[in-house]
Image: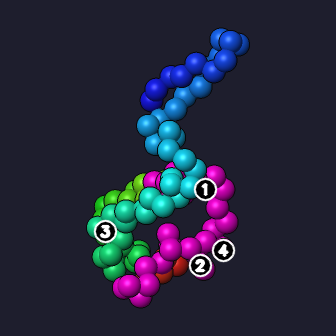
Amino acid sequence: KVRGRTGGSGSYRHMSSGSQRSGDSMKTDAFVWPQHYHFPPFFTKQPNVETNSMRVQMWKDLILNYCKHSRIFVISVRESVASSPLFGNDAISRRLQP
């Protein structure tokens, strides 16, 4: 992060290198889906406890990364599971079940 001074008030604002671009160009950066997003078992509860625990952690990481990239601060699980690309991969015909 780069700290930049704002005016004479003595306050600072934090800027990342990406925030120096215009708002429109930030929206054109496509989210890069992780490899496991294209793996059908990622969307299915796993019978092995350790495997399923790792799958759940990967989901947590994916959700946080996607929301950070898309600047989403609140999500409705019902609406998102039904329509968001985050919870469904049409290319492999899989959708996370609530």
Q: Is residue 4 magenta?
A: no
Residue placed most toward the observer, 34 or 53 = 34
Please report contact status of discs 2 and 1: CB closer than 8 Å, yes or no.
Answer: no
Between the C-alphas of marks 4 and 3, the distance is 23 Å
Helix, strand or loop at mark 2? helix
Please report contact status of discs 2 and 4: CB closer than 8 Å, yes or no.
Answer: yes
Residue placed most toward the observer, 9 or 89 = 9
- Residue at x 44%, y 84% (from the top left corner): 90
Q: Disc 3 marks which amino acid?
A: His
Q: Read off the residue under disc 1.
A: 72
Whole-percent x, y for residue 47 in the image: 35, 74
Q: Nearer the viewer, mark 3 or mark 2?
A: 2
Residue placed most toward the observer, 24 or 86 = 24
Between the C-alphas of marks 1 and 4, the distance is 14 Å
Q: Read off the residue under disc 2.
A: 83
Whole-percent x, y for residue 83 in the image: 59, 78
Q: Nearer the viewer, mark 1 or mark 4?
A: 1
Q: Read off the residue under disc 3.
A: 36
Task: Tell me the quarter of the picture where residue 49 sits.
Answer: bottom left
Q: Is residue 22 above or below residue 97?
A: above
Whole-percent x, y for residue 7 in the image: 67, 18
Q: What is the magenta range?
A: 65-93
Q: Is residue 86 magenta?
A: yes
Task: Tell me the quarter of the picture where residue 59 sits.
Answer: bottom left
Residue 79 numbered mark, or none: 4
Q: Nearer the viewer, mark 1 or mark 3?
A: 1
Q: Mark 1 or 4 closer to N-term?
A: 1
